[in-house]
Amino acid sequence: MAMADQEAKQSFRLSMLIYDSRYRAMTIQVVALILFIIGAGWLVNNAAQNLAALGKPLSFGFLSQPAGYDINQRLIEYTSQSTHGRAAIVGLLNTLLVATVGCILATILGVTIGVLRLSKNWLVARLMTVYIETFRNVPVLLWIVFTMAIFIEVFPAPREFKGADPSATMKLWDSVALTNRGVFIPKPVFESGSGIVGIVFLLSLVGIWFFRRWARAKQEATGVILPTFWISLGIFFIPAIATQIILGNPISLEYPVLKGFNFKGGLHLRNSFLSLTAALVIYTSAFIAEAVRSGIMAISKGQTEAAAALGLRYNRIMSLVILPQAMRVIIPPLISQYLNLTKNSSLAIAVGYMDITGTLMGITLNQTGREMETVLLTMLIYLTISLIISTAMNVYNNSIALKER
Amino acid sequence: MKELSYVRTEMLPEQAPPPGQTGVVRWIRENLFSGWLNSILTLAAIAAVYFALKAIIPWAFDSTWNANSLSECRETAPGACWAVIHERWPQLLFGFYPNGNDGHPDQRWRIVVAFILLIVAVAPVLFDKLPRKMIWFSAVYPFVGFWLLWGGTIWGPLMVLAGFVLAYFTYRIVAAIGGNLLGVIVAILVPVIWWLFLAGPITGVLNGIANIGLPDVPSSKFGGLALSVTIGVAGIALSFPLGVLLALGRQSNLFIIKTLSVGYIEFIRGVPLITLLFVASVLLNYFMPPGTSFDIILRVVIMVTLFAAAYMAEVIRGGLAALPRGQYEAADALGLDYWKANRLVIMPQALKISIPGIVGTFIGLFKDTTLVSIIGLMDPLALTNAIRADQDWNGIVWELYLFVAFLFWIFTFSMSRYSMYLEHKLHTGH
C-alpha cells in the first residue's frame, strides 16, 4: 500500500485531476460546489441590491405590528388589532385543520372506493372507475371552485327557512341547517363535570388498547379467539355514556336557531372551509383509491389461496394475510398523497378560506409590501409541515416494513 | 346366443344448460347478485345512477345553444344555457389573442397551426413506428412554435437555433482534436458568446436585409386553453431532462452532487406550487440584476419546470432503484463509461419502469397550469370569471365549469391512456 501511494504521489500530474478516476470525482464535486456557491451568491447579492434600492432591507419586524384585518374563521383568539405574526398563526392553524380533516376523510373514502373498484360486482366496479377517472383527471382548483359554486347556488338562503310555510327546512330532526351562507350544526357545550366524562372516555381508550393486547396474548397462548371488535366497541361507548347519564348530561348540544336573517348558535361551518375540504377529499380520494387498488393487486393470488388452504375465512384472509402485505405497498404513495393534500390546501386562496397562504402570503403581503419575507416564510412553514408529515409517516412505514435478514 | 348388453355404444347428445346458467341471466347472477351484500351494492349503484341521470339529463338536454345572454336563455329553455359556450368558446380556447375584432387582422390561425405542428412534432416521440427522420422536426419545433405564438422577426429564433448548431459542430471539431472534455467546455462557451454578443447585432443586420416576420403578440394577450397547453408543453419538455439529471445526481456517489440534488428535490417537494408561482410573479425579478425584467409566461414556465423536475427526479429515482445491481455491474464490465452506461443500459430500463409515474407527473403538471389563474394569468378557469363579469352572462356557473373540466379531461385522460398503451407495448414479460 505504502509503495503504491508513494508511486502515485511521485507521478502526479495536473491532468490526472481529469483523467484519473481517483481524482476526477473530487474535481467534479469541487467544480460543482464552486459553481453552486457562485450562483447562490449571485442571486443573494442581486436580491440584497434590489431590496436596498427599494429601501426595504430584509426584516421580519412587520410580524409584530398590528395586522388590521379580520379573519372570519379562527381557532384561537384573534382581532384586527392582533399582530401579523398572530394572523399567520391563525392561518397556519386553519391550514392544519383542513389538512387533518381532509386526510382522514380522504383516506376513508379512498380506501372504500379502492376496495369497491376491485369488487366482483361489475356495475359497482365500473362506477368506481368512472369516479376515479373523473375526479383524478380534472384540476383540483376547478373542483374547489365547483364545490364552492354548489354550496352557494344550490343551498337555500337563510331567509327561505322563515315563515309559517318555509320553502326550506332543517335536516336531521331540525339539527342541521344547510344554507348558502354555510352549514350550521349543533355545537357541544361543556359544563362542569364534562371533564370527568372526557377522562372516562380517555381511560376507556387505554382500556381498549390493554384489552386488545390481552386478547392477542390469549389467542397466541390458547388459540381462543375473542369477539374483540364488539367488546372494543362496547368499551368505547358504554363507560363514557354511562358517566354522562349519571352526572346528569354535563355535555349538551346547542342547536342552531333561525334569528333574524341568519342562523344563530350551533357551530357555523363556512362555505369556504366546506368546499375546500370537500374538493380536496374527492380529488385526493381518487388517487388514494388507485394506490389501494394497486397495493392489493400487488399481492399475488397465491397468498390468498395459501391462506384459504390453511382454512382461514375471507375476512381473516384479508386482515391477517393480504392487508398487512398490501400496506407496505400502499403506505409510500399514501404519504405522498397526504403531502399533496396539505400542499393543495394552499389553493384555499381561490375561495377565500383564510389559511396561511391567505393570511401571510395574501393580505399581510399586500398590506406590508414585504414580498420577500412573507413568501420565504410561507415556504419555510410549508416545508416544515411537509417534513414533519413525511418523517412521521416514514417512521410508521419503517415499523411495518418487511424485515429482511 | 345373442349377447345382451346394457352398455350404451354412443354418447348422449349434450343437453342445454339450465336457463339460470346461461347467457345474460348467468352473467347477471354472477356479476351483480352473487350474494346479499353484492345485491345491496348493485341496487344502491342503480339507484345512484338513476338519481344522478334524472337530475342531469333533463338539465343537459332541455337546453339552448342559441342566445345572446343568460336571461334570453332562461326564456327559451329551463335547462342548461350552452349558448355561453357557443358564443365564448373561441375565448376559452384562445384567450385574448388578436381575433380581428379591433381592426387588426385575425391572428388565431397561428395558434391552430402551432398546435397542429405540435402534434406532428410530438408524434415521432410518442410512436416509434413513424419515420425516425421526423425527430429532426421535433428538435426544431420549439423555435417554430415560439415564433408562431409570439411572432416578431423570424431571425431571432433562428439565431438562437444557430447557437445550438454552432455548439454541435464546435464539439465535433474540438473533441476530435483536443479530447472529449475540452470539446464539451468549448462547445458550451462558444454558443454562450454567440448568444450574448453576436446574435443580437447579426439579427439586426439580417432584419435590415430581409424583414420576415409575424406581428408581435405580447404575453398579456395569451389565455385560455392555448396558454395552458403552452405552459404545460414547455414545462413537460424542459422538466424531463432536468429530472433525469437530478435523479442521476441523487443516485450518484459523489457526496456534494448528491447533497445538492437531495436538498433541491426535498425543498421543491416540500412547498406548494402556488408559493413558487408567487416567487415567479413577485420575487423573481429581485433575484436578477437590477433593471432586468422578463416575460411573465417565461417566469411561470421556469417555475413550473423547476417544480415538476423535482417530482420527475423522484419518479425516475424509483426506476433507477428498482433496477437490479447486476445491470450496473454488467455495464461496467463491458467497459462503458458513466454516461454511456446510463444512456445504453441503465436509463432505457429505468425509464421503462417509471413510465406510469412519469406520465402521472406530466398529467399533474398540466393540471397545475390552472394555478396560474391565481397570479393573474388568463387560463380557462380565470376566463370563466371574466365571462361571468360580462353583464350578459352574469350568474352562469355550471356550463362554463363543465366545459373547462371537459377540456382538461380530454388531455389528461388521453395522456393516461397513452401511458397504459406504452406500458403494454414495452412490457417484455418474464
Image: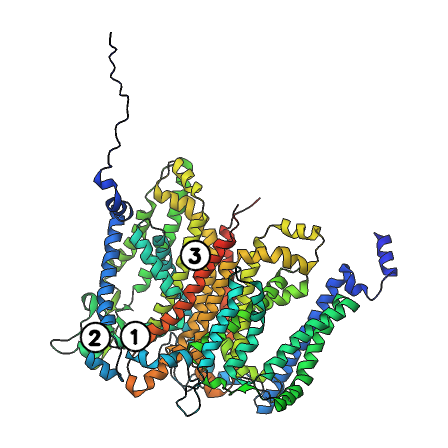
Kindly report which numbered mark, 3 or 1, lies closer to the viewer in this rendering: 1
x, y (%) of residue A358? 42, 79
Could you tell me how far apart the alpha carbons at marks 2 and 1 are, in whole angstroms?
Answer: 32 Å
Tag 3 secondary structure? helix
Does residue A192 appear to the left or right of A284 in the view shown? left
Q: Please give the name of the residue rendered at 65% of the width and 89% of the height, measured from the top-left corner.
A: B205
| Chain designation of label 1 | B
x, y (%) of residue A130? 34, 60
Q: Please give the name of the residue rendered at 72% of the width and 70% of the height, measured from the top-left corner.
A: B171
Kindly report which numbered mark, 3 or 2, lies closer to the viewer in this rendering: 3
Q: Please give the name of the residue rendered at 66% of the width and 57% of the height, measured from the top-left corner.
A: B341
For this orientation, the residue located farthest to the left is: A164
Could you tell me how far apart the alpha carbons at marks 3 and 1 are, in whole angstroms?
Answer: 31 Å
User: Which of the numbered marks, if any, corresponds to residue A257?
Assistant: 2
Q: Is residue A403 above or below residue A367?
A: above
The crowding category of the residue bearing disc 3, from other C-alpha atoms within 10 Å (few below 14, some 14 to 19, many at least 20), is: many
Does residue B108 appear to the left or right of B145 in the view shown? left
Q: Amino acid at mark 1?
A: Trp
